[in-house]
Image (cartoon, rainbow, N blue to C red):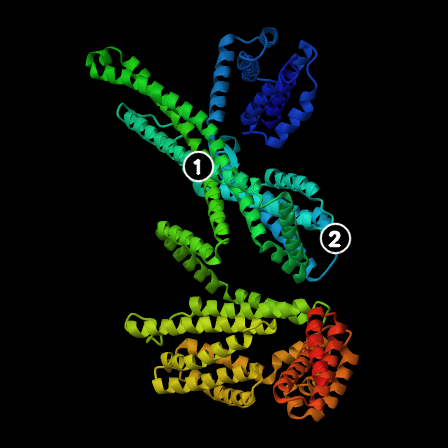
Amino acid sequence: MATSEKSVLEFITRLTYNIDGISTSLKLYLSQFFTFHFSNSLSVDVIQNIENKKASRGYSNNDEIKSAVADFSLEQRAWCVAVIRLLRKEAEATAERKWLNRVDGIAKDLEVVFDLNDDLIQHQLSKIEEEITEYQNRRVVHVQLRIWPLALDFIIRTSVMLIFGALQLDLSMITALNISLIPAIVLLVTYVISRRDRKYNMLLLQSHGGLHKFRVQFGISVSQYTWLAFFLGTSVYVSYLLPDQIYTFAFTGLVLYFFILLRFFRVGRIDENAIEQLVESPGAREEYDYDRNDEEIVQLETKLNSFTSRLEAYVLESALFGALTFSGFLQIMASDLVNFTDLENFAQYIFNTSRGLMYFDPKIVNAGLTGLSNKVSLLCLVSLESLICSGFFLAVIASRLRFSDVADRVTTSLNVAKTYNAKEEAMLSDRGASERDPRRLAHLTAKVNEQLHIAALALETVNPIMTYMRYFRNGGIIVFLAILVSSSLFITSVLGWVFIALVGATYVYFNYSRLNLSMRAAYLATRIQFIRKSILFLVISNIPVVVSLILSGTKYWALASSLMALGYVTISLYIFTWLTLAAHVDEEFGDIESNTNVVRAGRWEFVKYTLAILILLYGIGMAFKELHLRGANETITITLTSLSILMYFVGYYLSKIRWLGVMCGVLLAITANGVLFKTLHLDGANTMLLIAIVGLIILIPVLIFKRSYFHRLFLRFTITIAILTISIASGLYYRIELVASHHTTDIAPIIDVQSSNFADKFEIEPSLIPEGLRKCDWYIETYGSIAYTGVFRDVTRNYYYYAQNQVELQKSNGVDKESLRNARILALKARQIYAMFFLEDELEDVDETIREIDELSR
């Protein structure tokens, strides 16, 4: 059967495609019909192969035609002639009379050659027309196109740029990666996924009747278009910042790249539920009776009037806001407040700030932000926002033209439907007329249904138009609000925050129910996913710490410090999330988190969430301390002190024996205070940690054996605190960091270097300074070539703090030459280390301290 179908397809394509004067549109029409007709027995690839290769050579005479159809059945021969008649019928309105006569001649010649009667040909022609009607009315399957490959591409490019900037690598290499490697990776991943999705779609359609019975349409939403514009605009702007500045090539290349990904590597799966609904729904359009068509007319008119009134409101407010903002732009340009030089400087400031961020150069960033902070730059920003705002509103007005065409078609169809409906109602009111001519009544009802169907289809095309109008209108309003906020900065920044707060409050007020439902659903989904994958999230939260240890002994030590700070935040965020989402009810304990004791449960919720917040703040404080930011010690002190107080309540609520729980809370409070003293290097830290460790070692077995008296969360909490306390007291993490950064397990001399160079030791006993400096020189000679390690950081910080303290002390208590001499020696040693690693900001600070010492020494 398949071979016979191939022969029929080869014959008809060779015959029709080689008719002199046939247009490409007619060839496309025949190709679509052939694909639909032969899809039951042949694959699309086979059909296209026959069209491309076999149909390139036509038949030279009737004898060759007879030889080609020798094995054809009578129906197949009649089908071929019917195709020629179909081609003639399709071309009647567009083709010339001479070409139509030529086609008629070919059809007659075939009838003679095939020896066919007209009834058989007409029968085949009727079947073909039914197939075409079925093809044109086949069900449409809408598939939401996924643009995550473009998001993946953007994330990879951004990550590479940030890595190059953070590591101070040659940014000119990014261009080569953006052109070659990154697109290759994304295209390969997208090809694999798109091939898998295409196979899934084909199998799904095949299981529901075949591919030829459906028309698949891929769609992109408005939000996806917004992301595409963001990816394109940001990528082009970054290419402008790069040394090559090939932004013109980048724009052209990215547009082509996006088109290839979205057109030839489509990612998206058909929703099986949508297929089931299409298959179960009737194929033909719904027919209305005498009463239902009246209701449908009213509904369509109501929809049209609603769209029209909304459109008029959009157009009116767009005209007003657009004219207002554009007049403001012209007013600013016509005044003497801003000139073209100011606009060029404004653009240059933005360029410099962006490039400084990309190169991780704080000096350039600060200089650019300083230039953007004056009133002239603010006025330039307002003028730019005004131009963008007027552009958005102009797009709304332009969209009205498209709506007018559709509205005219809908209005015409409704008017025609109402005309036929009036005649129908007249016949129904005259009972004799409807009984005498029932066919006339049925004809009028069919006409009404036909016009209503046309109007409904036309009205469906209004939805995307209104969507885009609403999108541009909302964009214009948002930019207009940005203009108000920017303009309020001329008076005071408080007014700008007031505008922002009012906008947020208004949005929440009008969308409270929807936002509340969305947040509750998101909270539930987040909670389920976190509990399912808590181990994975724990591993992810520790990744920055591991990477920091790996980089700590390399030339990327600055990045290692930032990653360590990030690690403190991610780990504390994980604990915060675990406490708020995954600290479940302990049914065996049964005294809190239950409906039997609402007051106690509410108090425990307050304690639990307070505990989670304090742990998160402690992690942020440790990150601040790692980055040497102000407020770190204060944050750590407040959070750990509050945690020590909170431990009493934790023990109280998580224990059935209240006094025992409070005693456990005392032990946990001592642990928190010990960690605080250890972090701030205060006396008594080791003693408190030792007491805490011994107490926890005794407490944990008690909690295990007396399981029924304690909440399961209390046991987990105690074990975790015990592990952390032991690691802090033993300096485990610090030792691991030393091993990783120095690439040696013999770290005792390194620890001795640090302990011999504490600033408080020098203040108590200045005679220890020479020995400390000797050990520091040994460390510089041994490890000075690897990186700016934590030992260098702590030693120089101690030297600098000692020198500064001596300066302040000498200013208030009088000059002591010996103390100033020691301070200058330590400051010079700190300067030597800073100069080794090109730390310019630190050099400036220590030079200022040396100058102050010299002035006091005079």
**Residue on which disc 2 sits:** 173
Kind of residue indicated by mark 2: Met
Q: Quadrant of residue 250?
A: top right
* SS at circle 2: helix
Kind of residue indicated by mark 1: Leu
Q: In this view, does 703 lie to the left or right of 150?
A: left
Q: In this view, does 428 lie to the left or right of 318?
A: left
For the C terminus, the quadrant is bottom right
**Residue on which disc 1 sits:** 320
* SS at circle 1: helix
The answer to whether the residues at label 1 and label 2 have Cβ atoms under 8 Å apart is no
Foreground disc of the pair 1, 2: 1
Q: Which of 778 and 180 is in front in this view?
A: 778
Write the residue at 46% across / 73% down: 614
Write the residue at 62% across / 67% down: 563
Write the residue at 76% across / 73% down: 836
Q: Nearer the viewer, residue 596 or 485?
A: 485
